[in-house]
Amino acid sequence: MTQIPTAPAPARPKSLPPWSLLAAGVLAGGLLGGTYGMVRPPVYTATSYVVAVPTERSDPATALGFAQAYGRVATQLAVLGDAQAGAGVPVRTLKESVRTATSPDAPMVAVTATSTRPGLAAAMADAVSRALTRHAGAAEDTTRVELRQFARATRPTEPSSASPEVTGLVGAGAGGLLGGLALLVRPRRDAREPGRPTVPGPAAADAYGQP
C-alpha cells in the first residue's frame, strides 16, 4: 500500500523564558519610579508646637483635654482664615498643606505644614500656631487653659519627600509584583506540538499492518 506523505508540523515559535516577564516588570517599574522622583518637585516639612497650660483655677487633666480639642480646631476655617495673612497664602492652600497631631500623654499640639518652598512651610506652620493661640486666648476665661507657642518652626534644609533612588526602588518592587502576577495568570501552552494529529494517520496505520 502506498504511503501518503504527511505534511511536516509547522515550526513552533520560540517563546521568551518565564522569568522575562518578571525582569521586564522590575525594569519598567524602576525606570518609571526613578523618573517620577526626578521630575517631581521636592517637598519640605516644618513643624511648630503649642502647649496647653492650666491656669490657677484648672488642672493638668483639663489642659490635656483641651489640647486634644485645639488639635482638631487648628485646621478649621476660623483659625485658618486668621492665619492666612501671616502665612501669605490663601485659606485653601493652608487647608491642603497644614496638618495637626496631638499626644494622649502631653498637652501639646504639633502643627505641621508642607510646601515645595522650605521658607513657606515654616511660615505656614508658625502662622497657624499663632492664630490658634489667639483663638484659645479669647476663650481662656471659659476654658481656664492658656495656650502658648512652645517652639517655632525652623526652616527645613532637606526635603522630606522621597529621593529618586527610593522612588525607583519602590517602582521596581511594584513592577516586579505585577510581573509575577502576569506570570501566574499567563495561559499555559499545550504540551503537544501544534499541528500534530491526535489520531493515527495513514502512515501510522500502514506501519501496524492495517489496510
Image: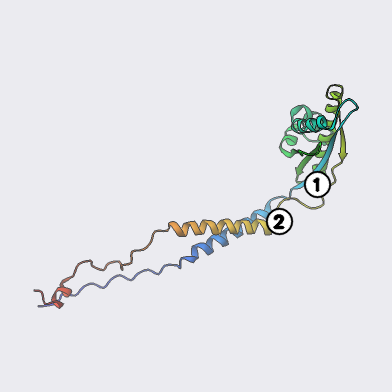
Q: How far is the residue under mark 2 from the one under mark 1?
A: 16 Å
Give the percent coordinates (x, y) of residue 138.
86, 24
Q: Which residue is mark 1?
A: 118
Give the percent coordinates (x, y) of residue 184.
45, 58
Give the percent coordinates (x, y) of residue 157.
82, 52
Give the percent coordinates (x, y) of residue 15.
42, 67
Q: Is residue 37 left or right of residue 17?
A: right
Q: Is residue 18 left or right of residue 5?
A: right
Residue closest to the far top: 142
Mark 2 or mark 1: whose residue is earlier in sequence: 1
Q: Is residue 203 above or below residue 98?
A: below
Residue at point 26% right, 68% down? 196
Q: Which residue is mark 2?
A: 163
So how many labels did they put on this image? 2
Residues at marks 2 and 1 touching, judged by CB atoms closer than 8 Å? no
Question: Within the image, what quadrant is residue 189 found in?
Answer: bottom left
Secondary element at tag 1: helix
Q: Is residue 126 visible?
A: no
* Mark 1 closeness class: few <14, some 14–19, many ≥20 residues within 10 Å: many
Secondary element at tag 2: loop
> Which kind of residue does numbered mark 1 sit on?
Pro
> Which kind of residue does numbered mark 2 sit on?
Ser
Which one is nearer the viewer's eye here, 71 or 95?
Answer: 71
Q: Is residue 107 above or below residue 164?
A: above
* Mark 2 closeness class: few <14, some 14–19, many ≥20 residues within 10 Å: some
Residue at point 57% right, 55% down? 174
Q: Is residue 171 above or below residue 44?
A: below
Question: Within the image, what quadrant is residue 93 found in?
Answer: top right
